[in-house]
Image (cartoon, grey):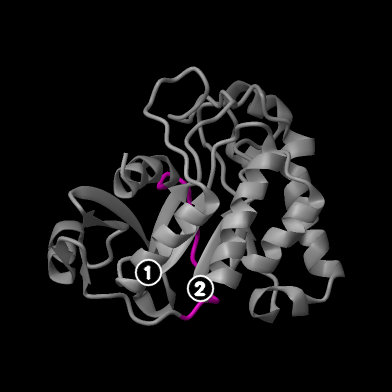
Amino acid sequence: MDAFHKLALATCQANLEADGEPSAFRPSPAPERSGGLTGRQVRQRYGAHPASWFADLDGYTIPLHMAAMPGGRRLPLLKSMLTTACERNCLYCGFRAGCDPQRVTFQPEELARLFLGLHQRGVAHGLFLSSGILGGGVRAQDGLIDAAEILRHRLHFRGYLHLKIMPGAERDQVARAMQLADRVSINLEAPSAGHLRRLAPRKDFDDELLAGLRWAEEIRQSRPPQSAWRGRWPSTTTQFVVGPAGESDLDLL
């Protein structure tokens, strides 16, 4: 399987992840052309401010997420997973254990170099990197950090990078991700442990999810930002799967 075929499969689930608005980031203007669609064709098909557009790469269609920027500009992000293999059985996920999609796995350097090539071609200005979990959250987080370190320090990528914090990641891994990324995120998915059990029976709300968000804030408050990328700590975000667990608006608030 060639690299763009793998990327087409790895991007479909990652594009369900919310990135938020990278408001502190100042990229160069988005390219007028991406793959087989011109900027004008994108605006005609998806409106003046599309949520996504598509690049045609060696016969494969790769979705790009158009993140909102200050002043109404859009930043084309490649949103990919390092692997679509997963041992968790989260009921909202198309790659959960027990499903039978075509699985793909990138080595960290393979994905880093693939993205950099797209960036140099003007296809994607930033990267949102997530992963399935195989062999535990610590191992999955190591892969994400390895890819980020290769991009930053070996390939000298200075653009926008959003890293996921994996369920079960360790505090030092959270700190390292925050040193490399412009944004980090860990999804709570539900507002309480009871609601989460209905959605993701193998995730622990307090120890695997909420702990990561707390560590990120503690690191932000207690450590000097000079060691972080651009000399400031990254922003942090989370998201919920709203509705199927029966939570109320008040529960979410």
Question: What range of the chain is rendered magenta?
Answer: 15-26
Indicate left or right for 31 with 181 as reference. left
Indicate left or right for 169 with 91 as reference. right
The image shows a total of numbered marks equal to: 2
Can residue 167 be spotted in the picture?
no
Locate residue 183: give its quadrant. bottom right
Indicate left or right for 35 with 238 as reference. left
Tell me the residue at 46%/54% (across/down). 111
Secondary structure category for the residue under label 2: loop
Report the residue marked by disc 2: 157
Tell me the residue at 44%/45% (across/down). 14
Give me the C-alpha separation between circle 2 and circle 1.
Answer: 9 Å
**Given contact means CB atoms under 8 Å apart, are the residues at marks 2 and 1 in contact?**
yes
Report the residue marked by disc 1: 119
Tell me the residue at 44%/61% (across/down). 113
Identify the mark at residue 221; answer none if there is no mark.
none
**Main SS class of the magenta portion in the image:** loop
